[in-house]
Image (cartoon, rainbow, N blue to C red):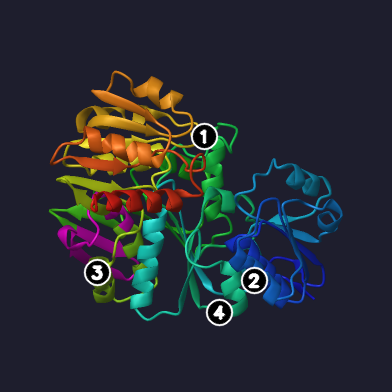
Amino acid sequence: MSINKHKIDTDGRLVVLGGGESGAGAAVLGKVKGMDVFLSDMGSIPEKYKQLLQSYDIPFEEGHHTEELILNAGVVVKSPGIPPYAPMVEKIAAKNIPVLSEIEFAAGFTDARMVCITGSNGKTTTTLLTYHILKKAGLDVGLAGNVGKSLALQVATDPHDIYVIELSSFQLENMYQFKANIAVIMNITPDHLDRYDHKMENYVAAKFRILQNQTKEDFFVYWQDDPIIREQIRLVQSEALHLPFGMDREKDSAAFVEDGIIHFATPGDVWEIPRDRLSLPGTHNLYNSMAAGISASVLKIKKDKIREALEDFEAVEHRLEYVATVDGVRYVNDSKATNVNSTWYALESMTTPTILILGGKDKGNDYTEIESLVAEKVKAIVCMGKDNEKLLKFFSGKVSHIADTHSLDEAVEECRRLASEGDTVLLSPCCASFDLFKSYEDRGEQFKNKVKSLLNE
């Protein structure tokens, strides 16, 4: 038996590389569909995923890869975090074994509609906001991709009529037949260039894979003021209906702002909402709200329901998240800012003198993008990472004080020493978290815990 949609042989052998959320979900889906499944992880598999695999009698290994158990696969599903140049992936490619992303694999087993969101920044908030609107409107909707549960696991055990999916460039790399009914690109700025041979065009091409296979029945939502998106649109053919959004009204704008009112104009519906009624402040969240509102309108959700959802949505954790005020100093957790452009948006929203915590695993960052905002709003920079040399070299002399720290405790204590009443301490690192932390969530949680401990001193 095979699935014509993606030509997956369900009588064949499925090997899954990576035992996290997406890998475990893919393994369960393969098992449910009758495939011979094996999962392998070079690292350690979290206990909850081990238990999930064991409950479905799925064999697995951790801490190593056994070639003879992997290279006999009919198809491989690879964790998005594993690069295409990993030794085992190269050996799989040499044997011409198909390698799919978990999203591509799962899509072969469902006819659900797909609302897919990508971009360098804003995609998580936009994804959660879109899901919130659809859920509030009573649709049978699942949340997947970089947030929510694995799409594959939901297709296997808790299927929905529609999915809202946050897609990274890593996930899009191994997607071929998948089709987004609504594809959203928030913006494209330099990120993950170490994965793409330090070539921006390779990163952009990965993002634009979200448009592949779209037809004239589908929709492409994008920020009209992004120069990279505008240029790439001229190079990539897409039959989907284009629905751009931005601050100013253009000929084909599906959303724009005029006199403090956000105007929406999508097929079959025209409506508006005052900008100051949005639950999320800041220019970046204005764009997030526009994209989510357009997607909801396309799905024919009533405008009153969309307005209500845009007004009561709660902010995303680790994204400009207020933590506490200690000795008159506000502490803000923006740990999700893992690239320069994301930190730009955070700084743009600051209205008080700011002590900025930067640092982590540099991904080929160009800090010139935030240089002018740092000069305007930042009184001190505290570098937090194993190796801060690049940051120290770039920002030395551009702020009145710059500190070199190598732990979160040390960084927060230095911020406390430098801050005065009325200041803001902003953790917006510009960098990935993997030098000192397990993830940006771990970094954010440790920051919040440390700040809250100051209240008890």
**Magenta-highlighted residues:** 262-288
For the N terminus, give its image quadrant.
bottom right
Picture quarter containing residue 205? Answer: top right
Q: Is the residue 39 above or below the residue 396 in the image?
A: below
Residue for badge 4: 158
In the image, which disc is placed on residue 51? 2
Image quadrant of residue 94?
top right
Crowd rating for badge 1 (residues with CA inside 10 Å; few <14, some 14–19, many 20+)? some
235 or 319, which is in the foreground?
319
Sequence-wise, the earlier of marks 1 and 2 is 2
Q: Which residue is mark 1?
A: 200
Q: Is residue 257 left or right of residue 210?
A: left
Q: CA distance from mark 3 to mark 1?
A: 37 Å
Label 4 Cα neighbours within 10 Å, binned few <14 / some 14-19 / many ≥20: few
Number of marks drawn? 4
- Numbered disc in front, either 2 or 4: 2
